[in-house]
Image (cartoon, rainbow, N blue to C red):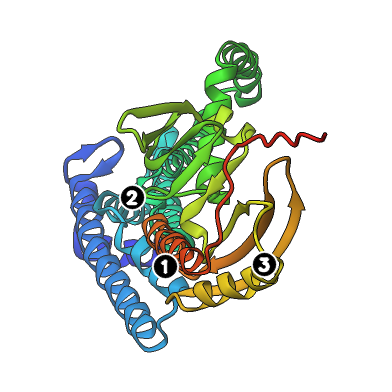
Amino acid sequence: MEKLLAIFDSFVKTESGIYFLGNSVWHWILALAITIVSYFLFRLVFKIIVKQIDNIANRTESILNNIIEDALKNSRFWFFAVIAVFFGSIILKLGEYEFIPAKILILTTFAQIGIWLNVIFNDILNNWSKKNNPDAAKNAGFTIISGLGKFLIWVVVLLLILDNLGVKVFSLMAGLGVGGIAVALAAQKIIGDLFASISIMIDKPFEIRDFITVGDVRGTVESIGIKTTRIRSITGEQVIISNSDLLDSRVSNFKRMAERRITFTFGVTYQTAKENLHAITDLVKNIIEAQSGVRFDRGHLNGFDASSINYEFVYWVTSPDYAVYMDVQQKINLAVIDAFAKRKIELSRPTQTVFLQN
């Protein structure tokens, strides 16, 4: 650089010109020219690099290449401007201010790295969401993770910047740590709900539009918030449950049920003929198997009550829809009533028979 400056000085008589901050006007003009040329040169080279990465990403369909490309596209103009100013300032003799261009370049680089890391983190989170949980973006836990990740990235960047500015970072962190513990203790319940929301997003015990049962609450999940989950009950009202209480409860998710197992029982009177008692199992089995979308499991005479002989039947409805199950059960019930009427089989009801002996 000194040789180039000497050649420039041989063509321009800088020593006879006007000086500013120890440098001639000609040197300032040369520095400005180097800055402008460097800026456009860096932008051109960077654009070529991004274009090549884009071509590779299109050929390979690599998620990593797409993330890198997206991050580089978020490079700010002021980042290139500061780099150009640094190269332009090399020819200047700034004396006690010699460190300023390099210091500004370092601080600007930290800020740009923070932007790149935020874009990378956001892309990774979005790709995870599309692959594992398409509805995650509607979950407040997703927003929390996204916001918390970006916050931590900028905290690290800020600490690096403060450290380069001469601030005692460790003392500052110690002070913030004590304050953070006090805040965490005061907001323990809220923080518990926040992490419960994140856990719901990651573990996915249920999602929006799932029909679930929590304790005595049955309904469809409408939203999963930062602190609470809102469920539209089957009776119409909206039930609001805190996320931490929700995860501490037993949750039944009916949307993920592929089939519905049905057990139904009935009893017949003790006056039923013996041949009919033997025929009932096969009779009801045939009725169940005649229904569409149904798989018979078992049927037995399973016990005796004070006024009835009891039968138990189990079958599977191949649809999880509750209305489908009720339609099937109704058809079975009506068919059983008709079949029993033909055979003069009487269904039991609570009765008491008194036998008198002389």
Quarter the C terminus occupies: top right
User: Looking at the rendered structure, which numbered label has been put on residue 68?
Assistant: 1
Amino acid of disc 3: Gly
Q: Is residue 227 visible?
A: no
Q: Which of the 4 image quarters holds residue 66? A: bottom left
Pointer 1 local density, CA inside 10 Å: few below 14, some 14–19, many at least 20: some
Residue located 53% across and 68% down the image: 343
Q: Position of residue 68 (x, y in %)?
A: 42, 67
Please identify, in this view, whether the residue under mark 2 or under mark 3 is nearer the observer: 3
Nearer-N-terminus badge (3/1): 1
Q: Please tell me which residue lies in front, 208 or 71.
A: 208
* Mark 2 and mark 3: Cα distance apart in space: 92 Å
Q: Label 2 belongs to which residue?
A: 89
Q: Earlier in the sequence, mark 2 or mark 3?
A: 2
Q: Amino acid at mark 2?
A: Ser
**Residue 299, numbered label:** 3
Q: CA distance from mark 3 to mark 1?
A: 63 Å
The reply to whether discs 2 and 3 touch (Cβ–Cβ < 8 Å) is: no
Q: Nearer the viewer, mark 2 or mark 1?
A: 1
The answer to the question of whether label 3 and label 1 lie on touching residues, with beta carbons closer than 8 A, is no
Percent position of residue 222, x then y: 34, 40
Q: From the viewer's side, name the closer residue of 338 and 17.
A: 338
Say above or below: 88 vs 145: below
In terms of image quadrants, where is residue 11? bottom left
- The outermost residue toward the bottom is 59
Q: Is residue 345 above or below residue 14?
A: below
Label 3 neighbour load within 10 Å: few <14, some 14-19, many 20+? some
In terms of secondary structure, where does tag 1 sit?
helix
In the foreground, 196 or 249: 249
Q: Position of residue 141 (x, y in %)?
A: 46, 40
